[in-house]
Structure formats: structure tokens, C-alpha cells
Amino acid sequence: MDLIDEILDNVKTIAVVGLSDNPARDSHGVSAYMQSQGYRIIPVNPALNGSEVLGEQSYADLSAASAAAQAEGVDIDLVDVFRRSEFAGAVSDDAIAIGARYVWMQDGVVDEAAAERARDAGLGVVMDDCILRQHKRRRG
């Protein structure tokens, strides 16, 4: 089984960093699709902190999102990065800090050093790819 299949088969909870409340944005559409496929989406966006996006409370950062999830007995399995590449390193470091199992950097998001740090910490990493496209590919 390759890493993408492993992620799609084993992940239950996805923290989406950079999730927009604007339905026209890719982050919103991809997250809504993944939610419709049974994944729990936790929005992370400081501009939306405390508001609801896709029926879930939004958090300012991964640390707050992880603490709230853990209070419910839920672990964040995957951190999905919808931020520009220059922010991916900090997000990846936060994913390591909260004990996520995977980091997924969406189309156009590339940070080799961040990916290497995450892999060195034991996380699976997908970079410059779209989780929605990969999910649909698997469904045939």
C-alpha cells in the first residue's frame, strides 16, 4: 500500500490549516468534499477563530485545535496545508508538535526542508498534491 492509500484508508480527523469560509475557495470545496466522504474536518484559520465553518468550530492554530479535539477524545490524524509554501514549515512543525501522523501539502505547496523534518519525526508526508483528486482517483 502506498502512502496516499494508507492516509485515505486510516485517517479519520483532518485539521485543515487555511480553511476558508468562502465556498468559492479551493480549501472550502476540498474540505466539504472530504467531509461528505466521512472524514471529520477541523478548520484552522486565525481570521475565523471561534466561528463555524462546515458546521465545525474554527481554531486560531493547530495547538488550540488539537487541545479541543483531545478534550473530545479525538486525535488529529492529518494536517492538510492550504497555505503558501513559505508558511508550510511552521505548519509542519506544529503538526509534529501536536502528534499528527501525516502532513499533506496541497497543490503548489512545496517545502522540502519542512517535509524532511516531518519525515524525520515519523510523519508521513504528501507534498504538492490534492487530497480530493487522489480520493476521487481511488474511487475509480
Image (spheres, rainbow, N blue to C red):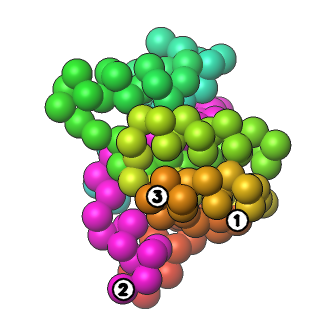
- Image: magenta residue range: 1-27
Q: Is residue 119 above or below residue 78?
A: below
Disc 1 packing (10 Å; few <14; some 14–19; many ≥20): some
Secondary structure under the numbered disc 3 in the rendered image = loop
Disc 2 packing (10 Å; few <14; some 14–19; many ≥20): few
Q: Are marks 1 and 3 in contact (CB under 8 Å)?
A: no
Q: Position of residue 129 (x, y in %)?
A: 65, 67
Label 2 and label 1: CA atoms lie apart by 20 Å
Which quarter shows the C terminus? bottom left
Front: mark 2 or 3? 3
Given residues 66 and 28, the one toward you in this image is 66
Residue position marked by numbered label 3 in the rendering: 123
Q: Position of residue 130 (x, y in %)?
A: 61, 65
Front: mark 1 or 3? 3
Q: Position of residue 17 (x, y in %)?
A: 58, 37
Give the farthest residue toward the left: 73
Q: Is residue 60 above or below residue 132?
A: above
Q: Please tell me which residue is depicted at 56% across the width and 54% down the height of the picture.
A: 118
Secondary structure under the numbered disc 1 in the rendered image = loop
